[in-house]
Image: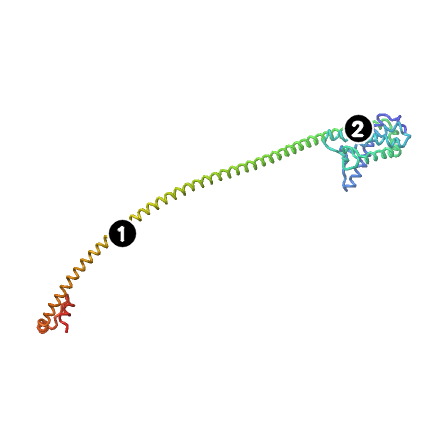
Amino acid sequence: MNYEIYTTVDWLMFFYIYCFLGWFVESTYVSIQHKKWINRGFMRGPFLPLYGSGAVIMLFVTIPVRDNVFLTFLFGAVGATILEYFTGAAMEALFKVRYWDYRRQKFNLHGYLCLTSSIAWAFLTLFMTEIIHRPIERFVLNLPPSLEWCLLGVVSGCFVMDTIQSTREALSLAKTLESVSKLRADLEEMQVQLALLKAETEQNIENAKEELRAAVAENVEAHKEMVSARREALEEAVAARREELSEAVEAHKEAVATRREELAEAAAARRETLAARISTLNEKMADTTRLLNNKKSILRPSILRRNPTAVSRRFANAWKELFKE
């Protein structure tokens, strides 16, 4: 390969060809893994600029060591690795998206490159410079200049338009991601504020409960004191009423005793009076009996003979006594 004969147009043609080959290989590989067609890369069209840029850099940096396989291997790995790192970091800084991520791989640097990828780039450099690039070089160098310019113009136009559109979409996506990230941050802040508000509300509720418990305790103590004072007042009133009732009972007992004595004296006087009257009546009854006994023999026969059916309703007993057989 004679790198000194390449023109700027040739380098651009190599760039576009390797962009297409890189897109075709990676899209085919990923599509087979996912069992469906996947258009890999940043752009809509069949271009992967990283592979085109990597191929051009690998071809360019190996110019001084084209005859040394080991140095070609080493220079290709270093050049492609540096390109991959800065391209990944720049795209993430600009578009807020990682288009590849090696953080799960061992010996990675910030996820933009890893040892496996660098070794793959080194072998790809040997494979490209020794095998792939030879037929591509012949194809490009044998193109008529007019045709080469025509193809370069068409492909460049499509590439530039695709790059502009893809960049706009990526920037729009970056803005959307920033908006979503800001909304998420606002949401997290709101959640924190809600958590703080909830904690503050719970604390206020606990404080209110404590205040209510204290107020209830004070009311209970005040009520107990009131009840105690009321009980003492009632006990004093009951004691005073009991004393009043005791005094009234004593006075009533004295009145009853006095009345009993009076009644006893009156009853004694009544008995004496009744005894005197009974004695008098007995004397009168004795006199009447004697008188009747004296009259029985005189009155009874004549009365019975004159009126044997005579009776006395008012003095029936006396009648029976006087006229009994």
Judge by depth and name the residue closer to the eye, 171 or 14.
Answer: 171
Farthest right residue in view: 67
Where disc 1 sits, the SS reads helix
- Location of residue 181 by image quarter: top right
Picture layout, residue 209 above or below residue 9: below
Q: Residue at x 56, y 36 (%)?
A: 203
Q: Residue at x 15, y 70 (%)?
A: 321
Front of the two marks 1 and 2:
1
Mark 1, other Cα within 10 Å: few <14 / some 14–19 / many ≥20 = few
Judge by depth and name the residue closer to the eye, 295 or 266.
Answer: 266
Residue type for callout 1: Ala
CA distance for labels 1 and 2: 144 Å
Residue denoted by label 1: 257
Residue 233 x/y as whole percent:
39, 42
Residue denoted by label 2: 156
Residue type for callout 2: Ser
Q: Quadrant of the C terminus?
A: bottom left
Where disc 2 sits, the SS reads helix
Mark 2, other Cα within 10 Å: few <14 / some 14–19 / many ≥20 = some
How many marks do you count on the picture? 2
Residue 127 x/y as whole percent:
87, 35
User: Would you say 59 lies left or right of 252 here?
Assistant: right
Picture layout, residue 194 above or below residue 301: above
Q: Quadrant of the N terminus?
A: top right
Residue 241 x/y as whole percent:
34, 45
Judge by depth and name the residue closer to the eye, 215 or 275.
Answer: 275
User: Would you say 80 lies left or right of 208 here?
Assistant: right
Mark sitting earlier along the chain (1/2)? 2
